[in-house]
Image: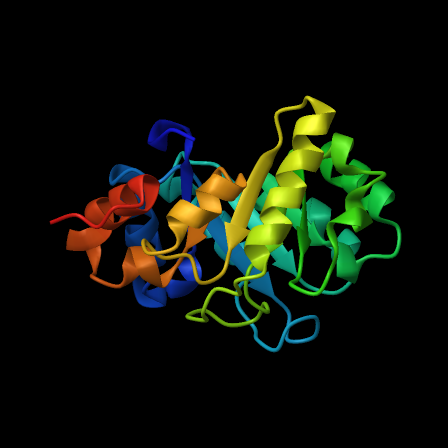
Amino acid sequence: MEPNNIKIAPSILSADFAKLGEEIAAITKDGADYVHIDVMDGHFVPNLTIGPCVIQSLRKHSSLPFDVHLMISNPELYIEDYAKAGADIITVHAEAVTHLDRVIHAIKDAGCKAGVSLVPSTAPDVLDYVIDQLDLVLVMSVNPGFGGQSFIGKSVEKIRELRYMIDETEKDIDLEVDGGVVVDNVEYIIEAGANVLVAGSAVFKDGPSGYAANIKALRTGKPLA
C-alpha cells in the first residue's frame, strides 16, 4: 500500500492532558488524518479517561474526523452523547455488547460512521454477519487499557485475515490497528493490510516540534534522518 493511502490517527491518550486543545491543533497542522480518542470506563478496561464533555470542548480545535474508541461496557447507552459531542466515527468492542447488529445501526442512526474493535483474544469470525455494515474495523494489537505497550506479534495474522474479509465485501472499510505501533513494525502491519495506524507514544514522544516528522515516519515506515 502506498504511503499516501495510509492514514495516521494519533491517540491523544499520550498527549499532554494539560493542553489537549493545543495538542490536537498541532497534530492537525502536522499531517494527522484522524484524531483518535480512547474512552475508558474503569470497568471494561482497567483505566479511566475522558467523556463527552471533554470531546465537545476539543471539537473546535480540529476539523479532522474524531475517531472515538469506546472501551466501555454497555456502549449503546452513550452513543447519542458521543455523537452530539462531535464524534465522527464511533467504535465499540464486540466483547462489550450483546446485540452487535443493533448497536451498529444505532451508531449510524446517530449520524456517525460505525466501527467495531476486537481485543487480541477475539477471533475475526465474530464479524462474519456484520462486517458489510461497518465503516471501520479496529484490531487491538495490545490488551486495551493502557498506552505504551508492546505490539503482539500474532496480530499480524489477524490483520491479514480481516483484510481478506473486508476485500470480500467490496466496500470501503478502514482496517485500523491500535497498540504498540511504531516505525519499526509499521511495514509488517501495512503489508498485512491495515490502512489506518493509531499511534500514541510514537507520535507524541518528542513534543510538538517532532509531531510532523513522527507522523511522516509512521506513514512511510522509515525513520527520518
Is 165 drawn above or below residue 20 in the view shown? above
Residue sitting at 70 percent across and 75 percent down? 43
Give the residue furthest to the left. Answer: 225
Q: Measured from the top left, where is residue 183 in percent x and y?
A: 32, 53
Residue situated in front as seen by the camera: 137 or 40: 137
What percent of the width, then of the height, locates residue 218? Answer: 32, 46
Is 168 in front, or is 103?
A: 168
Q: Residue at x 56, y 49 (%)?
A: 68
Q: Is residue 219 left or right of residue 102?
A: left
Give 42 or 50, whichever is nearer the viewer: 42
Q: Quadrant of the N terminus?
A: top left
- Looking at the rendered structure, the number of numbered marks drawn on it comes to 0
Q: Residue furthest top?
A: 170
Residue at 38%, 64% (x, y): give it. Answer: 14
Can residue 223 be seen here? The reply is yes
In this rendering, position of residue 196 left or right of residue 10: right
Quarter location, residue 52 = bottom right
Residue 136 is at least partly visible in this image: no
Residue in view at x 32 percent, y 58 percent = 202
Q: Is residue 165 above or below residue 221?
A: above
How is this picture coloured? rainbow
In terms of image quadrants, where is residue 118?
Answer: bottom right
